[in-house]
């Protein structure tokens, strides 16, 4: 059976209900959803306020890596039915969902929680999406910790 996979890099607002409906099939009995959001205040490292974030991506490479994440999830958790990996780009304001990772399966004990957690961790690790944080004290590119190795 072909299970639904939604991969999207979009400037459009995320409709979490519609995305979940697209990865739900008749045997689905569980869904785990992670949604990242823009913070208005950051308290870790150096506290600061955020007016908005500007997200950018090289779309062909980002979508290729998002598909890779979905394939890795399916390999590690073969009982996962549906997968949605969605990343917003453009200008996003505090309280706005920026990303969604959702996994569905027949039952909650089939790895949906672990698969969704893995999905967001891998998205942050290997998908080339960049964000600039703009606040009252200026702007700063937020740099991730991942540096691709040859062949990745």
Image (cartoon, rainbow, N blue to C red):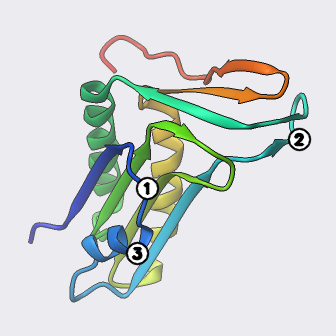
Identify the residue shown where x is 62% and y is 52%.
Answer: 37
Q: Is residue 70 above or below residue 111?
A: above
Tell me the quarter of the picture where residue 131 sits: top right
Identify the residue shown where x is 42% and y is 14%.
Answer: 149
Provide residue 90's location: percent of width, then percent of height: 47, 35
Disc 2 or 3, which lies upstream in sequence? 3
| Screen quadrant of the C terminus | top left
Question: In screen coordinates, is 7 left or right of 15?
Answer: left
Q: Which residue is identified by label 3?
A: 17
Q: Which mark is residue 149?
A: none
Q: Which residue is identified by label 2?
A: 43
Residue lying furthest top: 150
Identify the residue shown where x is 55% and y is 59%.
Answer: 35
Q: How many C-alpha atoms fall within 10 Å of the one at disc 3: few (<14), some, or many (≥20)?
A: few
Mark nearest the camera among 2 and 1 is: 1
- Residue 28 visible in the shown view: yes
| Screen quadrant of the N terminus | bottom left
């Amino acid at each position: 059976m072909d299970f639904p996979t939604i991969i999207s890099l979009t400037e459009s607002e995320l409709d979490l209900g519609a995305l979940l409906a697209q990865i739900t099939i008749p045997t689905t009995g569980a869904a785990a959803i992670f949604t990242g959001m823009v913070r208005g205040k950051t308290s870790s490292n150096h506290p600061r306020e955020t007016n908005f974030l500007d997200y950018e991506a090289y779309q062909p490479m980002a979508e290729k890596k998002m598909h890779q994440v979905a394939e890795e999830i399916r390999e590690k958790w073969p009982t996962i039915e549906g997968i949605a990996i969605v990343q917003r780009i453009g200008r996003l304001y505090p309280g706005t969902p920026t990303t969604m990772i959702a996994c569905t399966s027949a039952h909650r004990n089939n790895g949906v929680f672990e698969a969704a957690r893995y999905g967001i961790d891998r998205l942050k690790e290997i998908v080339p999406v960049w964000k600039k944080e703009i606040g009252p004290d200026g702007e700063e590119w937020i740099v991730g910790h991942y540096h691709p190795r040859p062949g990745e």
